[in-house]
Image (spheres, rainbow, N blue to C red):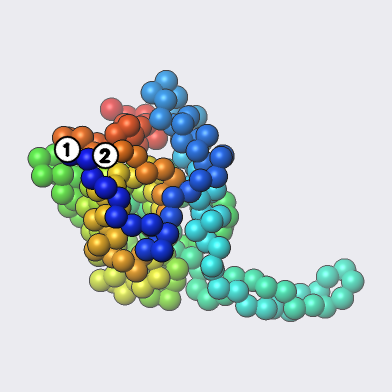
């Protein structure tokens, strides 16, 4: 495929993470010699580091607590619990990283598979926490390649009433970011690293291979 220029930046809800720990761990998962256990652990850790940034605007409300000294008003997360929605199956690898930050989060699932010829996604499962329209929703997928799966997943969430949506991925191609932002400009996109391009088989280059296979140890 020809080189595609990234059209969007932070002013357009597209945020590439620059933290040294994130970049270090991404290099580790790129390495083809990294084994399943270490790969899976790094995916979880990257998700947690990215989640810390992506969740910086969660709403707060003051509640009364009693310290060993006195009663005081102190902030806690307000509203309905966070909804985490991994895109199956690779997105499952990121869930524990986010729940480490917000253990009370509700978890939904969206199942998509990619047509090997057209590279377009097809839905086979969708189960979301309710009431979804009152929750901040974090959609997870390690790879954002063509953008088809991410667009379809967010389409399904919006059809069920979801409104406040963020998308987290570890590696993205410019093609996927452009497509996702054009389809859903209201969705904040958090990316661990923006890679060069897609190849003719719609794999991200340099990428890290098939994230699902590497997380679950399958071929």
Quarter-wise, where is residue 108 in the image? bottom left
Does 107 sit left or right of 147 as displayed? right
Residue ranking furthest to the left? 117
| Quadrant (top left, top right, bottom left, bottom right) of the C terminus | top left
Number of the label disc, if any, that sits on residue 219 = none
Tell me which residue sits at (89%, 71%) in the image: 69
* Residue designated by label 1: 1
Tell me if I can see residue 30 in this picture. Answer: yes
Badge 2: residue crowd in 10 Å (few <14, some 14–19, many ≥20): many
Query: Does the CB distance between marks 2 and 1 fall below 8 Å?
Result: yes
Quarter-wise, where is residue 56 in the image? bottom right
Tell me which residue sits at (38%, 23%) in the image: 32
* Residue designated by label 2: 197
Up/down of 163 relative to 146, above or below: below
Q: Which one is earlier in the sequence, the residue at label 2 or at label 1? A: 1
Secondary structure found at label 2: strand
Real-space CA distance between mark 2 and mark 1, rounded to the nearest whole angstrom: 8 Å
Image position, residue 140 (x, y; %): 39, 52
Tell me which residue sits at (24%, 56%) in the image: 179
Secondary structure found at label 1: loop
Tell me which residue sits at (54%, 56%) in the image: 53
User: Which is more toward the observer, 108 or 3?
Assistant: 3
Residue ranking furthest to the right? 69
Tell me if I can see residue 39 in this picture. Answer: no
| Quadrant (top left, top right, bottom left, bottom right) of the N terminus | top left
Image position, residue 151 (x, y; %): 25, 58
User: Which is more toward the observer, 113 or 8?
Assistant: 8
Callout count:
2
Does 46 sit left or right of 167 as displayed? right
Image position, residue 146 (x, y; %): 23, 47
Quarter-wise, where is residue 7 in the image? bottom left
């Amino acid at each position: 495929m020809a080189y595609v220029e990234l059209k969007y930046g932070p002013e357009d809800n597209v945020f590439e993470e620059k933290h040294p720990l994130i970049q270090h761990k991404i290099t580790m998962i790129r390495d083809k010699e990294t084994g399943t256990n270490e790969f899976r652990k790094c995916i979880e850790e990257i998700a947690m580091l990215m989640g810390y940034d992506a969740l910086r605007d969660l709403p707060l409300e003051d509640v009364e607590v009693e310290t060993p000294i006195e009663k005081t008003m102190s902030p806690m997360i307000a509203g309905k619990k966070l909804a985490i929605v991994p895109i199956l199956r690779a997105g499952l690898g990121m869930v524990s990283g986010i729940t480490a930050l917000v253990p009370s989060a509700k978890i939904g699932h969206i199942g998509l598979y990619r047509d090997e010829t057209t590279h377009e996604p097809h839905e086979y499962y969708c189960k979301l926490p309710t009431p979804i329209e009152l929750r901040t929703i974090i959609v997870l997928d390690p790879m954002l390649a063509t953008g088809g799966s991410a667009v379809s997943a967010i389409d399904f969430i919006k059809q069920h009433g979801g409104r406040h949506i963020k998308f987290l991925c570890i590696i993205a191609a410019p093609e996927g970011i452009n497509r996702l932002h054009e389809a859903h400009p209201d969705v904040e996109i958090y990316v661990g690293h923006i890679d060069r391009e897609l190849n003719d088989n719609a794999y991200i280059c340099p990428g890290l291979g098939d994230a699902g296979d590497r997380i679950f140890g399958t071929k």
